[in-house]
Image (cartoon, grey):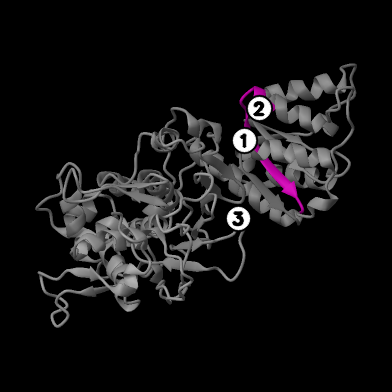
């Protein structure tokens, strides 16, 4: 049997302690695997209480912390039994689950707030108000633990058939493009049906959730929250109205590319010269691979059964990428900073992504983020668990200035949250990608592909709709062959209005 040690202030949470005990013992499933230890059920003995409960922590398999508003009795070192129990479980590398009662933080004792913060730095905490909510959260955590231990089998969400979906809901063109882009080229000259079968994306000829997310014609028709919400703020905290926001839809490939493009178009950059090649080199304040890794992890490892979406929020001092997901119960936040085994939350989704170099399956992605940030002298990213998983990537302190004295990284217009297109409210400041494109166009007209590369946008349709059209609509550039917009020889040249955003050329 798997022993659970329940740790809390006994008097304050007596009802919740008993409720957890009774539920586990009364559950036909959980009672087969778990037994609960409650200190108040131990017969009187000559053993000191503090020695007894620490011994029981050592003997247990799971530590279950119920943290309320009271810190509890303190010993001569100023620590409560609950605090000592948590630290003992941590020291002995026990599996730990933390449940926090209530959300009125101003009523919570200071030392209890400190204990909750200490626990939150290491693992996810789940918050509850009513007993029924506690039981629901507890059951989900214990069932997940049993699944991860291989004691019970449950089909992953991404491997389950998508209700109502048929093969006609998949885009054969996208499947063929995927087959052509795989790293090993093993799927070349393979029919779409064979590709799906090879990737285990069918269940009795019904597309799985993973198949819809990867190749669906309209994935959000079946999984409405499978979106990425991006927002750009000029303040250090969330303040409405949001200056620039967009909710991206489409396949996971679309979500990743467009979300990365959103961030890269708004952060600072420096553009070199074309002395060493046709294309001028571009360096971003945050390396593209760091931004991409954070967004890929969020999209690939999120909980798709949740009603929440992936959120990407860019502030003047940081980038925050959060998703409705968590770490495997056997993994801690600290594990992400060292070598660790990759345990994808959605293995049938992660596998196809890894075949196109999107996802690193060997558990090196987070370490690569840390390494690349260090190489460009950025603070190490932070990994956080609080009602979901978040990675916080820090920007360089201070803001870069363009040669004309304008602060780059400032948004000069306001996005329409429905279309994602800038409305063109000019404040005299331009975003970094616009400045870079205008500076390059001043030297000579550029083709659409060259502008796309300078802007740092990978998703072609998004570039045409949300970036190139903006330059034309605002009158900053114009076509060299205006009567033939789709000509293969079409280029784009800067206008007088565009030149007004740039400093005079150096003599």
- Judging by the rendered image, the residue that carries numbered circle 2 is 90
330 falls in the magenta region: no
Q: Is residue 104 left or right of residue 32?
A: right
Spatial CA distance of label 3 from label 2 is: 34 Å
| x and y, in percent, of residue 52 in the image | 81, 21
Position of 39 compared to 292: left or right? right
Q: Quadrant of residue 220?
A: bottom left
* Lower position in the chain sequence, tag 1 or tag 3: 1
Can you give x and y, in whole percent of width and height, for residue 299 in the image?
42, 53
Q: Earlier in the sequence, mark 2 or mark 1?
A: 2
Q: Residue at x 53, y 34 (%)?
A: 331
Crowdedness of circle 3 by 10 Å Cα count: few (<14), some, many (20+)?
few
Viewer-side label of 1, 3: 3
In the rendered structure, which segment of residues is drawn in magenta?
A: 89-102
Tell me if residue 99 is in the magenta stretch: yes
Q: Which residue is mark 3?
A: 236
Observer-nearest residue: 105 or 266? 266
């Amino acid at each position: 049997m798997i022993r659970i040690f329940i740790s809390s202030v006994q008097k304050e949470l007596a009802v919740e302690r008993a409720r957890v005990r009774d539920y586990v013992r009364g559950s036909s499933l959980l009672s087969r695997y778990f037994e609960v230890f409650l200190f108040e059920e131990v017969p009187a003995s000559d053993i000191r209480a503090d020695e007894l409960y620490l011994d029981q922590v050592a003997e247990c398999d799971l530590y279950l912390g119920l943290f309320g508003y009271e810190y509890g009795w303190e010993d001569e070192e100023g620590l409560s039994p609950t605090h000592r129990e948590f630290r003992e479980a941590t020291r002995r590398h026990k599996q730990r689950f933390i449940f926090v009662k209530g959300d009125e933080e101003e009523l919570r004792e200071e030392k209890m707030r400190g204990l909750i913060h200490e626990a939150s730095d290491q693992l996810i905490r789940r918050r509850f108000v009513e007993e029924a909510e506690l039981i629901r959260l507890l059951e989900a955590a214990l069932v997940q633990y049993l699944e991860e231990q291989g004691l019970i089998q449950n089909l992953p969400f991404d491997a389950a058939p998508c209700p109502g979906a048929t093969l006609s809901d998949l885009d054969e063109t996208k499947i063929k493009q995927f087959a052509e882009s795989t790293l090993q080229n093993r799927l070349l000259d393979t029919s779409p049906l064979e590709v799906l079968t090879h990737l285990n994306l069918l269940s009795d000829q019904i597309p799985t959730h993973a198949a819809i997310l990867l190749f669906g014609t309209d994935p959000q028709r079946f999984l409405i929250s499978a979106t990425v919400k991006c927002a750009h703020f000029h303040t250090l905290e969330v303040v409405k109205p949001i200056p620039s926001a967009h909710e991206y839809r489409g396949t996971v490939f679309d979500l990743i590319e467009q979300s990365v493009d959103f961030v890269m178009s708004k952060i600072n950059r420096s553009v070199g010269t074309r002395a060493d090649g046709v294309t001028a080199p571009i360096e971003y304040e945050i390396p593209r691979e760091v931004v991409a890794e954070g967004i890929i992890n969020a999209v690939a490892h999120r909980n798709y059964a949740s009603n929440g979406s992936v959120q990407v929020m860019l502030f003047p001092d940081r980038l925050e990428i959060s998703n409705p997901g968590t770490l495997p119960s056997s993994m801690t936040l600290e594990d992400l900073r060292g070598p660790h085994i990759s345990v994808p939350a959605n293995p049938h989704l992660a596998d196809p992504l890894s075949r196109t170099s999107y996802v690193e399956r060997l558990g090196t992605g987070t370490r690569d983020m840390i390494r690349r940030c260090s190489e460009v002298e950025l603070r190490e990213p932070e990994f956080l668990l609080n009602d979901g998983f978040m990675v916080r990537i820090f920007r360089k302190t201070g803001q870069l200035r363009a040669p004309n004295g304008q602060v780059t990284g400032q948004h000069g217009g306001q996005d329409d949250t429905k279309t994602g297109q800038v409305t063109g409210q000019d404040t005299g400041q331009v975003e970094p990608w616009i400045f870079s494109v205008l500076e390059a166009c001043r030297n000579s007209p550029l083709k659409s592909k060259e502008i796309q590369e300078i802007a740092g946008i990978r998703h072609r349709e998004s570039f045409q709709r949300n970036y190139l059209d903006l330059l034309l609509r605002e009158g900053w550039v114009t076509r060299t062959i205006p009567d033939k917009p789709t000509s293969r020889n079409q280029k784009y040249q800067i206008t007088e209005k565009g030149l007004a955003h740039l400093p005079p050329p150096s003599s």
